[in-house]
């Protein structure tokens, strides 16, 4: 199959090559009739615009980058998949970057993105500073992190999520719940989930014991030691709120090894509702993040910022309880 | 933080701007001494090359694209994560694409990649034809698919993997094993795993019953109906070889609902050894694909093909048995 060029399009449409180029680059006046004719020819003969040359003329590549700590973490792989779906519908390519949660690597990657003329970045970072963000000359949307400086942030309603988890465990009769959360780093969404969980339990006179994994555990995505410790220190525990489905999967494993039955002995609820939640045994009750909507809002914000428009600075999207077998 | 430009590098290194540009673009003769001086300045003052302009001058972007049926499938998200690790070490960016397993979308994406001046593509496709691949004017490496035409293919040793699974179940005393595999599409790696499994069992006078999911089930990644059918029709089954860890996760769920204990009543072995395998309860015995090495070989091949060098056409990498709790 020979490569179809704009010369072929021009010949097919009966217009000058320059006219096709102007349609492609949206440059100068072209009548709607001519534009329709050129676009019909492109479609008919299978022309795909050379996005590299297009990027050059617009001084912008139609690319969105996403920087996450761990691509393999089930929450982030779900985000990337949804982003590819949303972005490709709008004609963007998607770049992916593992930061390993390293603040210096995040900074390096943001500067790299800036020098690549991309349209914008979805950044999952708990540590980036307002000052650094301000220095980056491209649209950056923070996801799952409270607003930093005047950056744009999109997140799910972590507070309501924590409350829903508490009310659900209480309604199932739990009197001695524990929370097992991620690393104790300021700005992690798990913090807000835990705070509200504890608050709602307190209102029902239910005491909560909280555990947080270390940064090393978050880096390795292995929470077994923290979970063992929590169960060891709380033999009467009858409910667990794991602030991510990934932690919940590991709670199920430890309980199984200790002959603790879920949900009979301990009720377990997670957070995220990534595909993993539905693949566990027992299938996991969890709080669903609207990942598709989060990604869509982030891309909307990047588009508005690219056009120099204003956009809402702190977007919070609703969560919901998904009841399965673990509670 | 102001943007560092090549003018700043030139000033710092005490050379002309044109010299810095030539170092960046590897153009014309530059003495090693001058090159070292310029590179040291770039590092010192934190200059990041404008990869867009670099791509223009080389007529190539330093990007590798990966086209997979489903980014959220745990095998593919692991591949993408490993690819980002391997690629970023060598200075490549990674584009990701969901094809949904749609042959026409795969073709469209390959043409899009070609027009984007990227370095090469890792393609996970069971249906693309040799004729179409030949028409694509950029390095494409097929992963997990037998050689098509004279394309380059990298895959794990699926045959040995199927044999290892059979010998392991037999050694654990299984007499009536079944295989549950993915869609019955020619060229899927699961086929070779199943064939060798059946072959090795036959040599030990063990009969095997095989089930294959429909294409719809593969598209939705939901194999529950097929697994229910397999268990319903084979009440005496004492061993299951699931040709992916994702299928194995769902076997565990169905067995749990039917009060079939794993490993006491049925021994279960998967394939892939993605992180999911270690997160299941019981943790899954499986055949490990060397995903890091597969990705590294694929990137090596893309680099060789880009330079016009020859490369091995059919690369097969070793697998190994990972024994956990399910057998």
Image (cartoon, coloured by chain):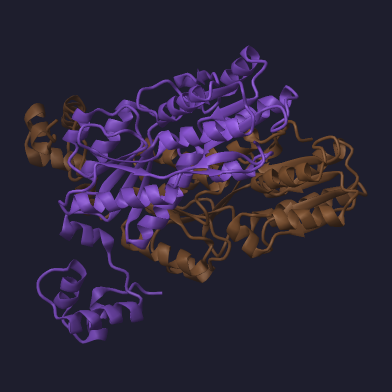
Chain colours: A purple, B brown
Does residue B324 appear to the left or right of B55 in the view shown? right
For the image, the number of numbered tags is: 0
- Location of the C terminus of chain B (image quadrant): top right
Give A166 or A188, whichever is nearer the viewer. A166
Does residue B91 appear to the left or right of B139 in the view shown? left
Q: Position of residue B191 (x, y in %)?
A: 70, 57
Give A28 or B134, whichever is nearer the viewer. A28
| Residue A157 to residue A220: above or below | below
Residue extending furthest top? Answer: A233
Does residue A232 appear to the left or right of B32 in the view shown? right
Q: Position of residue A143 (x, y in %)?
A: 35, 39
Give A268 or A252, whichever is nearer the viewer. A268
- Location of the N terminus of chain B (image quadrant): top left
**Image quadrant of residue A57?**
bottom left
Residue at position x 45%, y 43% in the image: A319
Residue at position x 60%, y 34% in the image: A171
Residue A219 showing in the rendered view? no
Q: Position of residue A313 (x, y in %)?
A: 24, 42
| Residue A94 to residue B137: above or below | above
């Amino acid at each position: 199959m020979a490569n179809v060029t704009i010369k072929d399009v021009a010949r097919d449409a009966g217009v000058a090559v320059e006219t096709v180029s102007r349609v492609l680059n949206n440059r100068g006046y072209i009548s709607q009739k001519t534009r329709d004719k050129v676009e019909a020819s492109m479609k008919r003969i299978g022309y795909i615009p050379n996005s590299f040359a297009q990027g050059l003329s617009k001084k912008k590549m139609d690319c969105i980058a996403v920087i996450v700590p761990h691509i393999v973490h089930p929450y982030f792989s779900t985000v990337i998949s949804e982003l590819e779906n949303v972005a490709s519908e709008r004609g963007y390519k998607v770049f992916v970057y593992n930061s390993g949660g390293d603040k210096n690597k995040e900074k390096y990657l943001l500067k790299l993105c800036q020098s690549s003329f991309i349209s914008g970045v979805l950044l999952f970072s708990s540590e980036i500073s307002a000052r650094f963000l301000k220095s980056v000359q491209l649209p950056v949307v923070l996801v799952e992190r409270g607003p930093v400086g005047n950056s744009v942030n999109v997140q799910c309603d972590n507070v309501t999520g924590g409350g829903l988890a508490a009310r659900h465990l209480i309604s199932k009769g739990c009197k001695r719940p524990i929370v097992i959360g991620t690393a104790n780093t300021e700005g992690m969404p798990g913090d807000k989930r835990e705070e509200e969980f504890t608050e709602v339990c307190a209102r029902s006179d239910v005491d909560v014991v909280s555990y947080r994994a270390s940064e090393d555990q978050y880096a390795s995505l292995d929470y077994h030691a923290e979970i063992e410790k929590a169960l060891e220190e709380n033999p009467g525990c009858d409910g667990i709120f794991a602030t991510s489905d990934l932690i919940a999967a590991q709670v199920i494993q430890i309980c199984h090894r200790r002959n603790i039955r879920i949900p009979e002995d301990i009720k377990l609820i997670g957070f995220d509702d990534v595909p993993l939640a539905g693949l566990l045994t027992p299938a996991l009750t969890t709080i669903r993040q609207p990942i598709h909507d989060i990604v869509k809002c982030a891309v909307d914000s990047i588009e508005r910022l690219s056009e120099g428009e204003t956009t809402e600075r702190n977007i919070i999207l609703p969560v919901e309880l998904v009841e399965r077998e673990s509670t």
